[in-house]
C-alpha cells in the first residue's frame, strides 16, 4: 500500500503560514518517510497575491478563500488570525467537507463549541493544538496522554511576551516600559501589545484548556483576568525578598461541582519549577491524584514552535482520513459547569501598605485582617526614609477567600496610618 496523499490548503501566509508552507515543501521527503503521508500544498490564500513570499510558488497564491473548497484539498490550515470573518470562513469550509487545523485562539476560545459541534455533525475534525502554547503540546497531553486520568489543577505560563518582560524586569532591573521595548526589538511582542499586557491572550488560552479538560464550555470573556500593567520594580523586589518570582499565571482548578479559571500575576516560590521558566518560554504544570505532577515547557510563540504544533495536527488528521467520515470525532460538549464566582476563590496573598512610621500600625492592620478570618504567614516592616516618617508594611497571608480579602484590604486602607492604596498580589 502506497503513501496516502493529503492535499493541504493554507489560509494566511504570515510568519507562521510562511514557515509551514516552506516546511511542507522542503521537508516533504522526511515527512513522507516518517509519517507515510504525502503532503501536497495545493493553495495558499492571502490578501495580496502580488506580494512575493519566500519559498511559496506564486502559482499557489490566491485571494479567494473559496478556492480552498477544491476537491484536491482535504485539510485547510488557518493562520490568518482575527475573529468574525475568519470564523464564518471556517464554518463554510467545514460544511464544504474540509478538515480544519487552526492556531486561532480567538476563534477557538470564543466560538470553539459551535465550531466543534458543526465539525462533529459534518464528520470533520478541527485540530487546534497550536492555539495554546504553540510548541508546548499541552492539549495533546490533556486529550490523549492523560485520557481517563483525573486532573485536579493546571497552572500555566501561557504568554511568552509577558514572561519575557517579567524576566527582564527581574534579571536586568529594567522598567516594564524598557522590557517591553526589548521584547518588541527581539520580535516577542506586537506593536500593540494590549492583548498580552492585559492578560487577554492568556485568558483565551486558559479558556481553551479548561474546556478541553472538563468538556464544559468556557469562553475567554468569562475568565476573571488581571494583566501585568501594574507590575513595578517594587513588586519585583518584594517577590525577591520573599524568595519568589513574579509570573503571569493561568490557573484552572477542577472540582466535582464547579470550575475555577483565572489569569493574574502571582508570586511563585523559587523552589517551584514555574519560577525558573524564563524569557519567552511557556510552561504548564498539571496536577493529578493518579499521575502526580507533570511539567511541560518550551517556546510558546514564533513560526517554528507554532508550525510544530500545526504539523502534529496535520499528521493526526492525515493518519485518520477516512475514519472521521465514518464516526464522529470524540468531542461533544456535555454542558456548562458552574464557574466559581471570583469572591469564592481561595488563595494566599501578598499585601504591601505605605504606612506612617508610628507605633501600633502593624497591630491595627493585623487585627483587621484577623477580624476577617485571615491568618498571617509572615510580616516585614521597613522605613522608607529616616526623615520622611513613612514606612512600608508587607504581609504574606495564609489561604483566604477573595471576598474576605477584598473587604479586609478596604478596611485597612481606611486607617489614618495607611497612606495609600494597598498593593495586592496573589500567591501560588
Image (cartoon, helix red, strand yellow):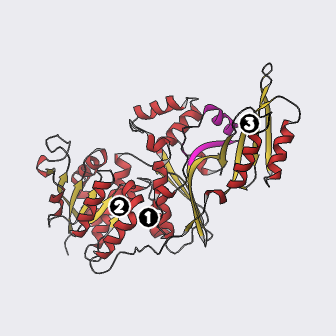
User: Which corner quadrant holds the N terminus?
Assistant: bottom left
Residue at x-position 29% and y-position 71% = 124
- Nearest to the eye among marks 3 and 1: give it: 3
Disc number lying in front (3 or 2):
3
Classed neighbour count for the residue bearing mark 2: other residues with Cα under 10 Å, few (<14), some (14–19), many (≥20): many
Q: Which class describes the residues within 10 Å of circle 3: few (<14), some (14-19), or many (20+)?
A: many
Residue 243 lies in magenta, yes or no? Answer: yes
Give the answer, above or below, for where 355 lies relative to 274: above
The image quarter in which residue 73 lies: bottom left
Residue 338, given in percent of the width and then of the height, sits at: 56, 68
Against 428, residue 128 (above or below) is below
Q: Secondary structure at mark 1?
A: helix
Q: Residue at x 31, y 55 (%)?
A: 84
Find the distance from the CA under tag 3 to the CA under tag 1: 44 Å
Checking the image for residue 353, the label placed there is 3
Looking at this view, name the residue that lies furthest to the right.
Answer: 359
Position in image of residue 341 (x %, y %) = 61, 60
From the image, tell me which residue sits under label 2: 312
Give the magenta-colored segment's residue range. 226-248
Describe the element under mark 2 as helix, strand or loop: helix
Is 53 one of the magenta-colored residues? no
How far from the left and from the top, in percent, is residue 104? 35, 54
3 or 1: tag closer to the N-terminus: 1
Distance from disc 2 to disc 1, alpha carbons, whole Å, reads 9 Å
Determine crowd level at label 1: few under 14, some 14-19, many 20+ residues with C-alpha closer than 10 A.
some
**Tag 2–tag 1 contact (CB < 8 Å):** yes
Q: CA distance from mark 3 to mark 2?
A: 49 Å
Amino acid at each position: 500500500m502506497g503513501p496516502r496523499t493529503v492535499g493541504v490548503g493554507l489560509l494566511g501566509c504570515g510568519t507562521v503560514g510562511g514557515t509551514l508552507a516552506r516546511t511542507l515543501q522542503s521537508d516533504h521527503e522526511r515527512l513522507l518517510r516518517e509519517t507515510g503521508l504525502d503532503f501536497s500544498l495545493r493553495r495558499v490564500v492571502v490578501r495580496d497575491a502580488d506580494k512575493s513570499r519566500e519559498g511559496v510558488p506564486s502559482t499557489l497564491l490566491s485571494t479567494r478563500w473559496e478556492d480552498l473548497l477544491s476537491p484536491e484539498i482535504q485539510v485547510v490550515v488557518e493562520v490568518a488570525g482575527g475573529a468574525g470573518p475568519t470564523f464564518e470562513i471556517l464554518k463554510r469550509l467545514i460544511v464544504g467537507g474540509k478538515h480544519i487545523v487552526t492556531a486561532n485562539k480567538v476563534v477557538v476560545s470564543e466560538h470553539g463549541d459551535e465550531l466543534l459541534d458543526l465539525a462533529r455533525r459534518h464528520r470533520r475534525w478541527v485540530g487546534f493544538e497550536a492555539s495554546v502554547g504553540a510548541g508546548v503540546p499541552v492539549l495533546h497531553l490533556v486529550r490523549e496522554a492523560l485520557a481517563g486520568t483525573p486532573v485536579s489543577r493546571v497552572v500555566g505560563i501561557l504568554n511568552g511576551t509577558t514572561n519575557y518582560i517579567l524576566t527582564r524586569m527581574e534579571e536586568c532591573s529594567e522598567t516594564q516600559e524598557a522590557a517591553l521595548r526589548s521584547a518588541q526589538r527581539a520580535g516577542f511582542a506586537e506593536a500593540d501589545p494590549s492583548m498580552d499586557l492585559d492578560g487577554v491572550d492568556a485568558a483565551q488560552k486558559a479558556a481553551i484548556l479548561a474546556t478541553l479538560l472538563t468538556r464544559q464550555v468556557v469562553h475567554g470573556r468569562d475568565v476573571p483576568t488581571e494583566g501585568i500593567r501594574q507590575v513595578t520594580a517594587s513588586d519585583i523586589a518584594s517577590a525577591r525578598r520573599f524568595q519568589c518570582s513574579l509570573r503571569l499565571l493561568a490557573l484552572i482548578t477542577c472540582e466535582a461541582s464547579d470550575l475555577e479559571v483565572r489569569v493574574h500575576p502571582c508570586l511563585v516560590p523559587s523552589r517551584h519549577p514555574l519560577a525558573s521558566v524564563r524569557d519567552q518560554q511557556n510552561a504548564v504544570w498539571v496536577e493529578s491524584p493518579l499521575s502526580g505532577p507533570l511539567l511541560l515547557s518550551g517556546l510558546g510563540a514564533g513560526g517554528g514552535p507554532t508550525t510544530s504544533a500545526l504539523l502534529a495536527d496535520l499528521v493526526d488528521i492525515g493518519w485518520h482520513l477516512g475514519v472521521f467520515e465514518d464516526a464522529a470525532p470524540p468531542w461533544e460538549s456535555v454542558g456548562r459547569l458552574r464557574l466559581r464566582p471570583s469572591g469564592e476563590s481561595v488563595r494566599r496573598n501578598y499585601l504591601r501598605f505605605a504606612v506612617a512610621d508610628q507605633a501600633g500600625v502593624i497591630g491595627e492592620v493585623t487585627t483587621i485582617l484577623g477580624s476577617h478570618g485571615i491568618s498571617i504567614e509572615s510580616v516585614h516592616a521597613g522605613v522608607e526614609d529616616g526623615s520622611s516618617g513613612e514606612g512600608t508594611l508587607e504581609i504574606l497571608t495564609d489561604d483566604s477567600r477573595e471576598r474576605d480579602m477584598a473587604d479586609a484590604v478596604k478596611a485597612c486602607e481606611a486607617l489614618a496610618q495607611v497612606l495609600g492604596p494597598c498593593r495586592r498580589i496573589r500567591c501560588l
